[in-house]
Amino acid sequence: MTRSTIGVFAVLAALVGALFAPGAARAEPLPVTFSFFAGIPNELAHPGGSLPGSNDFTCKPTARHPNPVVLAHGTGGSQQTNWGACVPLLKNEGYCVFALTYGAPSYLPWPGTAIGGMGLMEDSARQFKVFVDRVLRATGASKIDVVGHSQGTIVPAYYAKYLGGRNTIDKYVSLAPAWNGTTLAGTAVILPLTRQLGITAEELPLCQACGQLDPQSPFLRKIRAGGYYLPSIQYTNIATRHDELIVPYWFGLPRGGKNVRNIVVQDGCSVDFTEHAGLAGSRRAAYFVLNALDPAHPRPVPCDRAAPFSGSAF
């Protein structure tokens, strides 16, 4: 055997050893449970923690997925309770995934601190900005993609328009978008009445953000000012006809230009009974999210007979 042949075998042996070394083993995919309630056990087990697969500040984006994904929860949600389905799915797809809890009552002990989205949305947007800045520093990325649910579809919009985020967000995916607030359960009567009485959102007990979801609130007027959408961002709105909070559901689907796509999950899938909360746990909605984040590699979107509230197939 010649010296050169021995050298070739040595190189091959080193490569094989590297591939099968314990530290080089590929991580097992995280289990994905398509249900809005999938994150609650993690919050109970690890109060105030992060879901497995999220908030790894050593994660470096790949060439295929160069933008970290930042998740923005809805009213009453948190970084764990809102994203039990989405975090492991995105992590398994190779994304750097990050989530925060904003707008939680800091004066309460846990579990009060796990009930986010209660404070003024301007303040939540500032917390979102601080978190995004940290993500960008840690990952070295120049842009992020956003996936928001309910209130989490408009908090990042305030950041984009008024806190310097317009050149930081690349793709903006909204589940149960709340661009025009809600008229749920008489809010179309109650919230205007509070305005007439001179009661501001700051003076509402427990949930100041709820008052800002009045379609005519100063906060939402600022969101609409100059148009809902910024031309530098690609928007995807994903809604359900069975939304019991955004009423009517098309309130969350304002038309836009070429950079806006509106999706209704029942189009092409009439057996999908997902409502407002369930969109964050729905397999069908999740695949629309994947395609919005990576339009160059679309995949077929499943049609499940999906239950209300959880979004799970049944």
Image (spheres, grey):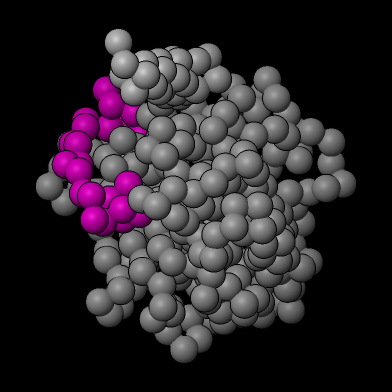
| Horizontal side, residue 100 vs residue 276: left or right | right
| Residue 151 on the magenta segment | no
Identify which residue, 290 or 181, lies in the foreground: 290
Figure check: 152 above or below 202: above
| Horizontal side, residue 47 vs residue 92: left or right | right
Number of residue marks: 0
Task: Examine the image and state in which quarter residue 280 appears.
Answer: top left
Task: Examine the image and state in which quarter residue 271 appears.
Answer: top left
Provide the residue span drawn in magenta: 290-314
Task: Provide residue 139's location: percent of width, then percent of height.
Answer: 59, 52
| Residue 293 on the magenta segment | yes
Please say whether residue 75 is visible from this viewpoint.
no
The residue drawn where x is 49% and y is 49% is 61
Figure check: 134 above or below 199: above
Task: Provide residue 148's location: percent of width, then percent of height.
Answer: 48, 54
The residue drawn where x is 38% and y is 29% is 34
Figure check: 252 above or below 33: below
